[in-house]
Amino acid sequence: MSAALKNLLLPVLAVLALAGGYWAAQSLRPADKTTTPTYGGGELIDFTLPDVEGKKRSLSEWRGKVIVLNFWATWCPPCREEIPLFISLQKQHMAGDLQIIGVAIDNPTAVMVYRQSVRMNYPILIGNDDTLSLVAKYGNRMGSLPFTVIIDRSGSVAVRKLGAFTQTELESLIDPLLNPSKI
C-alpha cells in the first residue's frame, strides 16, 4: 500500500472508529442520557499537538492551573452542545487559574471554521493518529466523544467524564479545585 493511500486511510478509519464508539456509547447509555463522572486516578499525561494555527503546544505549558481537557469533534452533537459552556467558563476565569483546552479529533479545516463560527476563546489542539491512544490512556478505551478530563493544579486527574457536562455539574466539580479553602 502506498504511503499516500495510508495517509488518507488512517484519518478516515479514525473518524469511523470514533463514530462507531460514539454510536456504541449512545446505544449502551442509560435512558436518562447521563454519564456519571469518575473521580481521581492518574497523573497528567503530557503530549504535544499543533494548535489551529499549526504551532506545537504541550499540555505541560498549563501545569499549575486547573485544566479542563475536552476531546471533541465538529460532527459530534453533544460536543457542540457543551462548547458554549466551556466558552462561558473560560470567559469567567480568563485571568484565573482555570484553562479549558479542546483537542479536536477532526478535520483541521472543519475545526477552524467551527471555532470561528462560535468564537471559541480557549486553545484548540488538532488531534492526530496517536490521539485515540492518548484518549485511551486517560481512561476512555471506547474512544467515544465528548470526553473530558479535569486535572488539578498539581497535575493529578481529578475527574473523567464520557459525555457532555451540564453547567451545574461542571461548576460543582471545578469550584473545589479552584477554591480549596471553601471545601
Image (cartoon, helix red, strand yellow):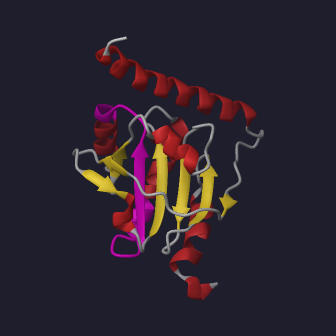
Q: Residue at position x 28%, y 32% from top?
A: 109
Coordinates of residue 2 in the picture (x, y in percent): 32, 12
Magenta run includes residue 105: yes
62 vs 55, left or right, is right
Q: How many labels does the image show?
A: 0
Magenta run includes residue 134: no
Quarter occupied by residue 58: bottom left
Coordinates of residue 132 in the picture (x, y in percent): 50, 38
Furthest toward the top, the residue is: 1
Q: Residue at position x 45%, y 41% from top?
A: 131
144 vs 36, left or right, is left
The part of the chain drawn in magenta is 88-110
Question: Closest to the observer: 87 or 72?
Answer: 72
Is residue 4 placed above or below 68 in the rendered structure?
Answer: above
Quarter occupied by residue 5: top left
2 vs 80, left or right, is left
121 vs 137, left or right, is left
Question: Closest to the observer: 87 or 55?
Answer: 55
Is residue 17 placed above or below 6 in the rendered structure?
Answer: below
Instruction: Please indicate, yes or no, whether residue 85 appears anywhere in the rendered image.
Output: no
Instruction: Please indicate, yes or no, whether residue 109 appears anywhere in the rendered image.
Output: yes
Is residue 57 placed above or below 66 in the rendered structure?
Answer: above
Q: Residue at position x 53%, y 45% from top?
A: 135
The quarter in which the N terminus is drawn is top left
Coordinates of residue 17 in the picture (x, y in percent): 54, 27
Question: Closest to the observer: 97 or 84?
Answer: 97
The quarter in which the C terminus is drawn is bottom right
Furthest toward the bottom, the residue is: 181
Coordinates of residue 140 in the picture (x, y in percent): 61, 45
Quarter occupied by residue 168: bottom right
Question: Closest to the observer: 37 or 114?
Answer: 37
Q: Residue at position x 63%, y 37% from top?
A: 142
